[in-house]
Amino acid sequence: MVLSEFAPSPPLAEFVRVYRVVHFVFNDITKIPYKPYPPKPEHCLSFYPRDTETVEYTNSGIKIQNLKTVVFGQQTEVTNRYVGKDFLVFQIVFRPGGLYRLTGIPSHQLNNSYFDAETIFNRSIKEVNEKLNDASNFSEMVVVVESFLMKQIKMGAKEVHRLDHVSSLVLKTDKMLTVEWLAKESCLSLRQYERKFIERMGVSPKYFSKVVRFENAFRMKNKAPHLDWLSIAIRCGYHDYQHLAKDYKIFTNQNPTAFHLLDNASPERKFGEADTY
């Protein structure tokens, strides 16, 4: 089993936050457990060179399957992911504004979506999966994906905006930055900042910050399961446990303990790993 992340090369660092590789091979399991995937503050392009996954949206009940390349924007609800026995995904996690710059698609159109990437990029994207499957190591995979990205950028990508750099700060700090401060640092009025942020990230700045804080708490619990919920709440900028529990209810429809009991049965747990990325 592999759960790894790789940094992008300097020419692509303004578009890509990280490359994520997940590989499971289930030889002795007849029924593979599903993973409840909570909202995360990220937009992704995912390649599935081997077995794909089935994605079920828990609120709407929509189920999507058998896609080899997928684009998805900001998720605001839990998705249950069901993987195959030889499951490999190479995921491009974009920086704030990165996917918008690459595609020109207003990001709110990608919210709670799981789009076939062939409908957005040209059909040469299919070759990427074939090359990823033939790659002998993860470094070769990165080269394949970066070659694809560079070609897409050369075909015409939108210019970076100061808002993109400023919005990335939300991901790097454990403090709640005010929208007023972010707008000022972006050299925009409050209304302009909120409008452009929704265009580039799909949700409002305040909502995005709430997702970031929630994900920090989720990952902290998985990294340090011995910590009690009140300690995690305070460390992640919540006022108290009830404040944390309210966000868990919003994002997962569960209280913190109940959702992590579901997560404890995820596929990676079969290999002694936890979702900490």
Image (cartoon, rainbow, N blue to C red):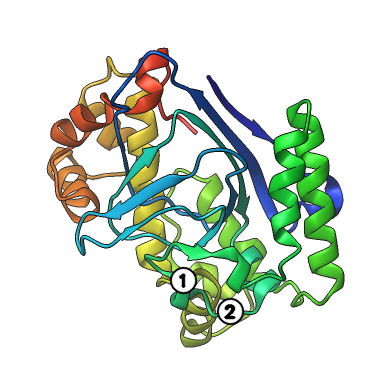
Q: Residue 51: where, in percent of width, then height? A: 51, 39
Q: Is residue 7 visible?
A: no
Q: Is residue 86 visible?
A: yes
Relative placement, left or right, of 79 versus 257 is right
Which residue, given by chain and number where applicable, does mark 1 sit on? 110
Q: Residue 265: where, in percent of width, then height? A: 26, 25
Say whether marks 2 and 1 touch (CB < 8 Å). yes
Q: Secondary structure at mark 1?
A: helix
- Of residues 175 and 126, which is closer to you in this image? 126
Q: Residue 194: where, in percent of width, then height? A: 46, 79
- Specify the amino acid type for callout 2: Ile
Relative placement, left or right, of 273 versus 61 is right
Which numbered marker is on residue 105?
A: 2
- Of residues 80 and 177, which is closer to you in this image? 80
Label 1: few (<14), some or many (≥20) within 10 Å?
Answer: some
Residue at left offset 59%, top offset 82%: 188
Give the mark nearer the N terminus: 2 vs 1: 2
Q: Residue 273: where, in percent of width, then height? A: 43, 18
* Image position of 215 with respect to 209: above or below: above
Q: CA distance from mark 2 to mark 1?
A: 8 Å
Q: Quadrant of residue 23?
A: top right
Which numbered marker is on residue 135?
A: none
Residue at left offset 44%, top offset 48%: 175
- Of residues 276 and 267, which is closer to you in this image? 267
Residue at left offset 22%, top offset 45%: 239
- Specify the amino acid type for callout 1: Leu
* Image position of 104 with respect to 179: above or below: below
